[in-house]
Image (cartoon, rainbow, N blue to C red):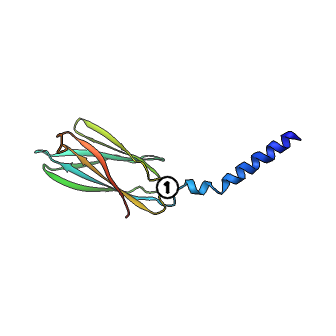
Amino acid sequence: MQRRQVLLGATAVVSGFTGCIGSFTSAGSLREVNVELRNADDRARTFHLTLETEAGVLDWESHHIDADVDKRVTMTPNEEVSPVALHGAVEDFAGSVDILGVDDLDEDYCLRFHFWSAHPSDERPQMGQVADIEC
């Protein structure tokens, strides 16, 4: 008899959570990732980028950027996935930016990043998330 009460109690608890599970998932989805590649050097550089999602890492993209030029690159996941990180490399620098705070968005969104070959403050390569923006 006691075992039956425990099983009934456990079933009631699990059933109670069923209605709450929807609030832990996002109704919005990632539409695109915009990356501003900034080559502040006096010679051309090749930037390499990829987006990591919960489903895995997308194909790496390479972009040749002339000296003292900025170029905006758009990456578009081909399915509804949650982003995990943006990875990039230029010359001997490799870095990543973890993507946080987008799991509970109720509308479609885009992400924007900067990737510098030499940041103005310390003249070293840097990556950073600029904003979570509505598309």
State the residue at coordinates (72%, 49%): 13
How many numbered circles are shown?
1
Using the image, determine if residue 95 lies above or below residue 101: above
Q: Amino acid at mark 1?
A: Asp
Coordinates of residue 40 in the picture (x, y in percent)? 15, 47
Quadrant location, the N terminus: top right
Q: Which residue is mark 1?
A: 104
In percent of width and height, residue 132 lies at 37, 56
89 relative to 18 in the view: left or right: left
Residue appearing at x 20%, y 44% in the figure:
117
Please report the residue visible at 19 percent of the width from the left and 44 percent of the height from the top.
119
Answer with left or right where residue 44 lies relative to residue 128. Answer: left
Q: Residue furthest right?
A: 1
Direction from residue 135 to residue 89 in the image, left or right: left
Question: Residue extending furthest top?
Answer: 92
User: SS for tag 1?
Assistant: loop
**Residue at the spot x=18%, y=48% of the render?**
39
Q: Residue furthest left?
A: 42
**Picture coordinates of residue 15 (x, y %)?**
72, 53
Rendered image quadrant of residue 48: top left
Residue 32 is situated, as x and y percent measured from the top left of the image, at: 37, 58
Asked which quadrant contains residue 76, the reply is bottom left
Q: Nearer the viewer, residue 127 or 19?
A: 19
Circle 1: is it few (<14), some (14-19), or many (20+) Cα within 10 Å? few
Quarter of the figure with the C terminus: bottom left
Q: Tell me if 83 is positioned left or right of 131 in this view.
A: right
